[in-house]
Amino acid sequence: PFESRFPINVGITGYVATTGE
């Protein structure tokens, strides 16, 4: 899903960043 754009390594941080933007 959203984490497809960012590595799973980022985890919750990448998730919030994607949903935040």
Image: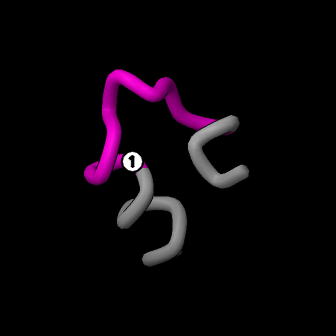
* Residue appearing at x 27%, y 51% in the figure: 13
Percent coordinates x, y for residue 18 in the rendering = 52, 61
Percent coordinates x, y for residue 19 in the rendering = 52, 73
Three-letter amino acid code at disc 1?
Gly
Element assignment for label 1: helix
Residue 20 to residue 6: above or below: below
The reply, left or right, for residue 14 in relation to residue 19 is left
Percent coordinates x, y for residue 5 in the rendering = 66, 38
The reply, left or right, for residue 21 in relation to residue 12 is right
Q: Residues within 10 Å of mark 1 (few under 14, many from 20)?
A: some
* Residue appearing at x 54%, y 34% in the figure: 6
Residue 17 to residue 12: above or below: below
* Residue appearing at x 72%, y 51% in the figure: 1
Give the magenta part as a residue range: 5-14
Give the residue number, with chain letter if any, for mark 1. Answer: 14
Q: How is the image coloured?
A: one colour
Asked if residue 11 is among those painted magenta in the image, a careful observer would answer yes
